[in-house]
Amino acid sequence: MRFFLFVFVHMLHTRIEQLILIVLIFSRLWPRFTGIQSNLEQIASYLPSFRSVLEIQSECRAAAEMSLGEEVQSEGIAIRHALECRSVYYRYDATRPNYALRNINLSVPAFGMTAVVGRSGAGKSTLIDLLMGLTAPEQGSIVIDGIPLTKARLRAFRQSVGYVPQDPFFI
Ligand SMILES: Nc1ncnc2c1ncn2[C@@H]1O[C@H](COP(=O)(O)OP(=O)(O)OP(=O)(O)O)[C@@H](O)[C@H]1O
Ligand SMILES: [Mg+2]
């Protein structure tokens, strides 16, 4: 400090009142500068979280409900005979050749209990998602009492479906 005073007063011939003014201005401005710096650091520390929120947002958009189109029915659809899969193919990644389900044909009779049994990864959950209309087959169709499940009937059909997930959680 003394050194700076010496430089200012003796070498730069600064007048003492000018020096006081400079010191005053700097002492006022300095907290502002440090404040701006700490704000910038804080913003930088939030950036990774912000990035991951954006990623989650775009993942959610990609996994959003498929468009339901025009709805023709608002009441639930009652199954009287059977819920069927006809030549159903489904794969999670359309760019790859491995299908989770390949040429599935089955009939789930109404008013009964049907169990789907198989090894882990066999495609049980995939099948159930298709039967519930949560996903749509790539080829083939889901048929309710002989009538294919179209987008127009999807919401009505879902009103008739109850679902207990594989990994339930309690709040
Ligand atoms: N979201 C997903 N993205 C990509 N592949 C998936 C996805 N879900 C399942 N798969 C793949 O699809 C195949 C069938 O999986 P699925 O979950 O239907 O099996 P599962 O019979 O229900 O198995 P588990 O008894 O373990 O529940 C598996 O090869 C699995 O790796
Ligand atoms: Mg499963």
Image (spheres, grey):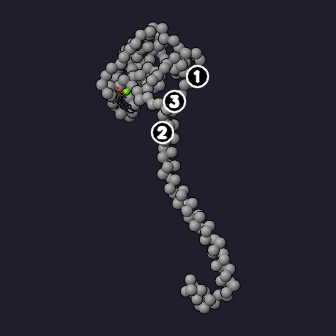
Reply above or below: 103 against 61: above
Q: Residue 59 carries which label?
A: 2
Q: Distance between the residues labelled 3 and 1?
A: 14 Å
- The answer to whether residue 136 is visible is no
Q: What residue type is labelled 2?
A: Glu
| Callout in the foreground (3, 1) | 3
Amino acid at circle 3: Glu
Q: Residue 132 carries which label?
A: none
Residue nearest the viewer, comparing 102 with 135? 135
In space, the residues marked 2 and 1 are separated at their CA atoms by: 26 Å
Residue where numbered disc 3 is placed: 65
What x and y, as percent, mark residue 71? Answer: 58, 20
Q: Where is residue 170 in the image (x, y as percent from the top left)?
A: 47, 30
State the residue position of label 1: 70
The amino acid sitting under disc 1 is: Glu
Which residue appears farthest toward the right when viewing the image? Answer: 17
Asked if the beta carbon under badge 3 is closer than 8 A to the nearest atom of ligand 1, the reply is no
Please tell me which residue is depicted at 65% across the width and 83% down the height of the picture: 19
